Image (cartoon, grey):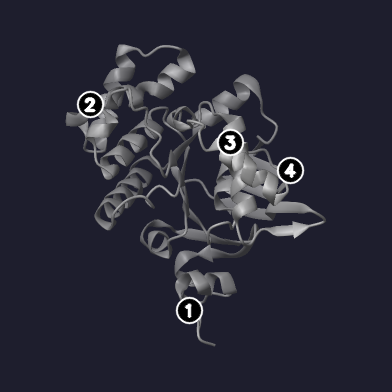
Amino acid sequence: MISIQHVSKTYDVPKKAARRARGKSAGIDTSYAASVSGNAVLAGAAVSQAAAEVADALRPAVRDGVVYALDDINIEIADGDIFGIIGMSGAGKSTLVRTINLLERPTSGRIVVDGQDVTDLAGSALRAYRRRVAMIFQNFGLLAQKTVIDNVCFPYLAANGKVTEANRVHALELLDRVGLAEKAHSYPSQLSGGQQQRVAIARALACEPEVILCDEATSALDPKSTNTILKLLRDINQETGVTLVVITHSMDVVQKICKNVAVLDSGRVVETGEVARVFAEPAAEATRVLLGKVDWDA
């Protein structure tokens, strides 16, 4: 069970300053952070990126000169669920998912996982927690200079400082699971976008996580590749019981794969519940906009 309790995330960053930060951070190579799938991060780059996203968004809540990327978020995600977090650009989705694996520290509130308050974890305890919570990114986050199998093995290297033969055997099994065993010695540049995302999924599974966070994992893919990835994630959830948290702006993705959903708007949860109910009877204006159930000419 993941329990997000009264979580807020604020930035004391004026918009102009944040845009300057965005320009400075644009040249930072975040592929290393992405590649570790939750074992280690370039925290400075992540925070700078988040601040820029909040400043550039159209709908963040601003009170007393403080930007609220997240504003008193309360969500419970059951073990084994496929839980969607949806909203328009700037709603706070990516910031929220980064608070779950503590790439972002909440300004207030708690993240409780299986009864343990993980909000203030540090050092070896934080590294151990992040091995339980893997992450899949929109841009795949593969290391271009490493082969596919070395990318999948990278979490072992990050966690233990070495890759054993048993690790490589397991990595090959994971590649076979995602249908890419024959690409083990290829490089990311030799793969399609959908294939690269399948490699990223295999890498996320390497440390046998309890939770996988999918941050816009299909938004860079064509419809056919998107369906392949969604089916793969659903099958992995059914086979292993891993909890999936799916961040997306696509109601179609939520409808295809998620069991429950939370809708974010201006950093707040405006609606939550079973997908079928939310789609059939949307209560919040933000949900109706996402579903296209508004009269644009009114």
Q: Residue furthest right?
A: 64
**Which amino acid, mark 2?**
Ala
Q: Which residue is mark 2?
A: 184
Establish if 241 lies above or below 152.
below
* Residue at 29%, 19% in the rendered image: 168
Alpha carbons under labels 2 and 3: distance apart = 35 Å
Asked whether the beta carbons under mark 4 and mark 3 sit within 8 Å of each other, the answer is no
Per the rendering, the mark at residue 293 is 1
Few, some or many residues within 10 Å of mark 2 (<14, 14–19, 20+): some
Q: Nearer the viewer, residue 92 or 208?
A: 92
Which tag is nearer the camera, tag 4 or tag 3?
3
In the picture, the quarter occupied by the N terminus is: top right
**Which amino acid, mark 4?**
Thr
Query: Does label 2 or label 3 sit earlier along the sequence?
Result: 3
Per the rendering, the mark at residue 80 is none
Alpha carbons under labels 4 and 3: distance apart = 24 Å
Q: Is residue 194 left or right of residue 96?
A: left
Establish if 132 lies above or below 270.
above
Q: Which residue is mark 4?
A: 107
Query: Does label 4 or label 3 sit earlier along the sequence?
Result: 3
Q: Which residue is mark 3?
A: 24
Query: Does label 4 or label 1 sit earlier along the sequence?
Result: 4
